[in-house]
Image (cartoon, rainbow, N blue to C red):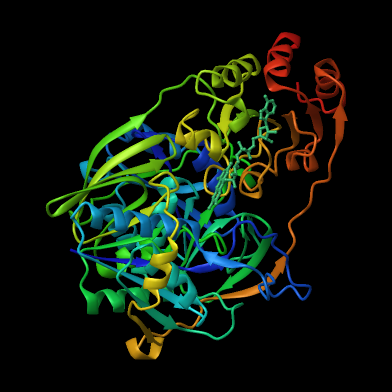
């Protein structure tokens, strides 16, 4: 079967985030960008399903700025077969909303007819945790979010999900959208030869207009502010002093 | 304005704390109707009706709602949506599973993990692991919102709203429940506990994690963990605190053998008092801790337990 894996170009998770002085957002000029860590896990899972003979073709899709090409090349170097880039903006500071992304992905799915979409459960920039669920709704497909194990069995998939009380296993009919959590797998690094090979893999470029999708935002950003900061307190010398402080000063014991 | 609040359920029982906290946020938006949808949930519906400020409880009891599957629940919520300006759920795993699906079916943008209600259209929410707080205004006809429970006080009980039984909606029959692996515990719940003791990679093994648990039990605390501790198998997944785990704001948070990565801080930096025990005096956790103890946890934790 065919699998689509959406990948997002986001600020690298190690980079210190700075709010722009004018409050319009976070400064992304000249900062290191990488594939959203959850999406790496999604790509890895698709590759493992391919290695297991369940999947024949993996199509990576990215929506955003033109530079997301690099993110797609990473997916191709890891093992995706081809890529589709939908250039929706030329401003890195413009984050397309999950609803718009889901509509574009639906259009891609309508053309490509995959049996599964495997995506990250959230992007570490807007932290919305929404695109997979929204795509599944628009397609009228089943959804399995926060996956920590995926087993494909005939025309369904058994997915174990990380939920508040522990783990829940459900069975979803295919086609399905699966959103992945951190413990599903450990993504591989692309080897140098595979990075070279990835340069020759097909990467098709599109725009939202090609799919007739309106991507105008529903939410307006009123302001972006630094969170309240905590300052360092004191170092205590030993356990006795710690207990005394917690009892007498903080009053929490 | 009228609000439909999706009650949080756990095995058919009302998850009172999460529901009552989300209710506090929902009340700022308008008149609140609570939806209790599950299986074997008569008591849950009756309990939801006692929450202060609830106008009505809608009760849908059917096997298809028994395990929180998103597709049938979303179909039910969408069938009710016409009567409401806002659809609200706590930002729990269940709420995050459901709300975006409902929003997409209504062709509106979901507003996830809201930490503050400014007005009926305008909400505050953290982005970039809490490194920025964004205020967004929605232009959509129906607002679908999940509320981060740590930021709202629980609404009290004392009300007596009417309970109206409603029929189940059509079942899309796309997925089915297989099994739950849920750990029963007498400890307080992580997201509602007054004290949380969390262990990180520094704890070293699953066996050693008993140290953290025993300190927690002495304090009547819940147990949390860093991602590294969970990934290494020292602690179960539902103990993870952070950007992608649970968000907690207890009176006292004790971080043991945790370095203080931003992804961890995202889940605990709103705690009232933070204690860090770490043998590395340069560990970033000390930059936000009210009380820092530079020590080997294998000495400090037993000594602390002893001293309490
Ligand atoms: C997309 C993404 C999402 C993430 N989400 C989360 C999340 O939700 N929650 C989360 O916690 N992390 C999350 N992380 C991981 C995060 O970046 C850190 O890797 C993780 O928090 C580190 O855990 P730790 O502090 O236990 O381990 P480490 O960083 O390895 O720190 C261990 C600490 O223990 C101390 N130590 C060791 N031995 C002892 C001893 N004997 N006595 C005292 N101290 C000792 C060390 O000095 C060190 O400071 C996420 C990462 C990514 C990329």
* B50 versus A243 height, above or below: below
Left or right, B10 with reference to B291: left
* Residue B208, quarter of picture: top right
Quadrant of image for the C terminus of chain B: top right
The residue nearer to you, when weighing B120 against B145, is B145
Left or right, A201 with reference to A13: left
* B94 versus B221 height, above or below: below
Left or right, A96 with reference to A223: left
In percent of the image, x 63 and y 29: which residue is there? Answer: B202
- Measured as percent of width and height from the top left, residue B145 is found at 50, 59
The residue nearer to you, when weighing B105 against A42, is A42
- Measured as percent of width and height from the top left, residue A59 is found at 30, 70
- Measured as percent of width and height from the top left, residue B71 is found at 27, 55
Q: Quadrant of ligand 1?
A: top right
In percent of the image, x 50 and y 50: which residue is there? Answer: B91
The residue nearer to you, when weighing B174 against B12, is B174
Instruction: Mark yes or no: residue B108 visible.
Output: no
Q: Residue furthest bottom?
A: A209
Q: Residue furthest left?
A: A154
* B255 versus A95 height, above or below: above
The residue nearer to you, when weighing B281 against B19, is B281
In percent of the image, x 72 and y 22: which residue is there? Answer: B296
Instruction: Mark yes or no: residue A228 visible.
Output: yes
């Amino acid at each position: 079967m065919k699998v689509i894996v959406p990948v997002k170009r986001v600020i690298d998770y190690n980079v210190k985030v700075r709010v722009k002085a004018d409050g319009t957002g976070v400064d992304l000029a000249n900062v290191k960008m990488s594939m959203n860590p959850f999406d790496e896990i999604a790509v890895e899972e698709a590759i493992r399903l391919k290695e297991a003979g369940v999947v024949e073709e993996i199509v990576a899709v990215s929506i955003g700025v033109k530079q997301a090409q690099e993110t797609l090349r990473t997916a191709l170097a890891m093992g995706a077969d081809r890529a589709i880039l939908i250039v929706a903006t030329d401003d890195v500071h413009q984050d397309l909303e999950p609803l718009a992304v889901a509509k574009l992905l639906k259009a891609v799915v309508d053309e490509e007819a995959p049996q599964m979409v495997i995506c990250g459960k959230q992007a570490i920039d807007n932290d919305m945790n929404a695109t997979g669920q929204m795509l599944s709704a628009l397609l009228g497909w089943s959804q399995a979010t926060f996956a920590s194990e995926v087993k494909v069995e005939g025309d369904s998939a058994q997915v174990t999900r990380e939920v508040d009380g522990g783990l829940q296993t459900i069975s979803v009919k295919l086609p399905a959208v699966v959103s992945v959590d951190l413990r599903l797998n450990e993504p591989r690094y692309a080897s140098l030869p595979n990075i070279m090979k990835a340069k020759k893999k097909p990467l098709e470029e599109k725009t939202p207009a090609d799919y007739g999708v309106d991507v105008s935002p529903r939410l307006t950003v009123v302001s972006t502010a630094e969170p309240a900061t905590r300052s360092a307190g004191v170092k205590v010398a030993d356990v006795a002093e710690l207990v005394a402080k917690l009892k007498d000063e903080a009053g929490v014991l | 304005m009228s609000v439909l609040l999706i009650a949080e359920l756990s095995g058919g029982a009302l998850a009172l704390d999460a529901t009552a906290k989300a209710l506090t946020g929902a009340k700022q938006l308008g008149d609140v109707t609570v939806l209790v949808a599950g299986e074997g949930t008569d008591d849950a519906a009756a309990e939801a009706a006692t929450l202060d400020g609830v106008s009505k409880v809608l009760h849908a009891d059917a096997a298809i709602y028994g395990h929180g599957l998103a597709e049938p629940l979303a179909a039910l919520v969408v069938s009710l949506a016409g009567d409401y300006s806002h659809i609200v759920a706590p930002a729990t795993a269940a709420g995050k599973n459901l709300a975006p699906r409902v929003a997409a079916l209504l062709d509106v943008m979901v507003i996830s993990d809201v930490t503050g209600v400014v007005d009926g259209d305008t909400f505050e929410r953290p982005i970039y692991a809490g490194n920025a707080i964004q205020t967004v205004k929605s232009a959509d006809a129906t607002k679908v919102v999940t509320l981060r429970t740590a930021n709202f006080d629980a609404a009290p009980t004392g009300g007596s709203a009417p309970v109206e039984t409603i029929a189940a909606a059509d079942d899309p029959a796309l997925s089915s429940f297989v099994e739950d692996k849920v750990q029963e515990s007498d400890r307080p719940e992580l997201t509602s506990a007054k004290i949380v003791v969390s262990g990180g990679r520094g704890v070293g093994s699953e066996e050693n994690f008993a140290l953290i648990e025993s300190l927690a039990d002495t304090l009547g605390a819940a147990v949390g963990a860093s991602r590294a501790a969970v990934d290494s198998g020292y602690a179960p997944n539902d103990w993870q605190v952070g950007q992608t785990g649970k968000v907690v704001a207890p009176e006292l948070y004790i971080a043991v053998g945790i370095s203080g990565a931003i992804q961890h801080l995202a889940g605990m930096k709103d705690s009232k008092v933070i204690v860090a025990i770490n043998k590395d005096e340069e560990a970033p956790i000390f930059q936000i801790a009210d009380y820092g103890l530079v020590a080997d946890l294998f000495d400090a934790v037993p000594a602390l337990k002893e001293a309490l």
